[in-house]
Image: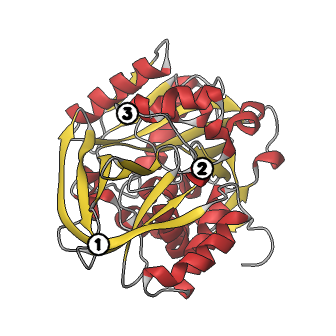
Amino acid sequence: MSGRLTIIDESHLDDLALGSVFLATGGGGDPYVPKLITAEALKTYGPVPLLAPEDVEDDAFIVTVGSVGAPTVSLELLPSVEDAARTLDAFEKYTGRKIDAVASFEIGGGNSVIPICAAAAKGIPVIDGDGMGRALPEAQMMSYPIGGVKPTPALAYDYAGNQATFETDTTETYERHIRAFSMAAGGMVTAAEHPMTGRQLKDTVIPGTVSFSVKLGAMLREKRGQADTLLQPLKALFETSIYGECKLLYTGKVIDKTTRIIGGYDIGEATIQDFNASADPLLINIKNEYLLARQGERVLASVPDLITIVDFETGTPINGERLRFGQRVAIFATGCPEFYRTERALKVVEPRCFGFDIDYIPLEAL
């Protein structure tokens, strides 16, 4: 992985999926099926240009595309090769504008590869960046609307080919409406939203996260092994990135995990007990993503910093919907991009936005 990554082809998908699941903090949807359909699209249409944000023309028309819904449903309501491209086709027809490039909502699991699948079929580039630098559960938490990009006009496409269009006054209203459509459509839809100019993209995107995910995934694959041996390679990789700090918080066994689909989200918690049962268990709060890690009353990490659970024996990151009772795991925490530590971003992503009555304290200060 030397030099700048300028295309995405089949050879990058395994590493991209692996790295993006680590960054997804449990959310973003399981990448297995999206990765398969993206590989099929790349095989059919050829590699996709990966466009650095600074290389985008200011007047280019950029649209974000991905899945919206409860990640658990993505294990059952499977997407097809055509869904993402058909969503963009319908969006172009609806708006009367040709899309020049697509970008990700979030660099998270399935949502990291769906834009590539769409871009391959449309013959357009995908942006090397996303709207979160991780995964988060709600639309108003993306960097695009935080930076002033409107979410609509938007269009959603369900598994049966039904479409819904959206014109809303605020991103919070859009989030409620798209979530309601997703619930009515079985729990998962593909959406094209947050249309913007190249200039707006440059001002709001979290840059370089697609190529960084490939690099992270390659490292996880090459260093595959017991999770505690990954700490030094992870620290070295993250400290030179937009993320910074990386810590190993806890190792142990999942002794309880409960989630329910509430309002279109996977909501619940997981409890991990250390292997010797000599310390207080670790509690992880979940809303699609792993949001808060607590040991008793002590907060070890919180949103918007990243909390990642990996398989202890292999270091493979585990999506929230794949986390199970009895798994032996390790919990890592990573700093969030600087954008999410700004006052305007914390207004929509601090712990209190998720119902936790605590202040956000940066990972390195805990």
Viewer can see residue 290: no
Q: Mark 2 highlights which residue?
A: 365
Q: Is residue 331 left or right of residue 101?
A: left
Q: Could you tell which of marks 1 and 2 lies nearer the N-terminus?
A: 1
Compute the Cα span from label 1 to label 3. 27 Å
For badge 1, the amino acid type reads: Asp
Q: Position of residue 229 (x, y in %)?
A: 51, 84
Compute the Cα span from label 1 to label 2. 24 Å
Q: Quadrant of residue 266?
A: top left
**Residue lying at 37% horizontally and 55% vertically, measured from the top left:** 29
Q: Could you tell which of marks 1 and 3 lies nearer the N-terminus?
A: 1
Q: Are marks 2 and 3 in contact (CB under 8 Å)?
A: no
Q: Mark 1 highlights which residue?
A: 274
Q: Mark 3 highlights which residue?
A: 354
Compute the Cα span from label 2 to label 3. 21 Å
Q: Position of residue 317 (x, y in %)?
A: 41, 69
**Residue lying at 25% horizontally and 43% vertically, measured from the top left:** 267
Q: Position of residue 321 (x, y in %)?
A: 27, 58
User: Mark 1 or mark 3: which is in front?
Assistant: 1
Disc 2: CA contacts within 10 A as few (<14), some (14-19) or many (>=20): few
For badge 3, the amino acid type reads: Phe
Q: Is residue 140 left or right of residue 178?
A: right
Quarter placement of the N terminus? bottom right
Looking at the image, residue 347 lies above or below residue 110: above
**Residue lying at 30% horizontally and 52% vertically, measured from the top left:** 296
Mark 1, secondary structure of its residue: loop
Nearest the viewer among 254 and 84 is 254
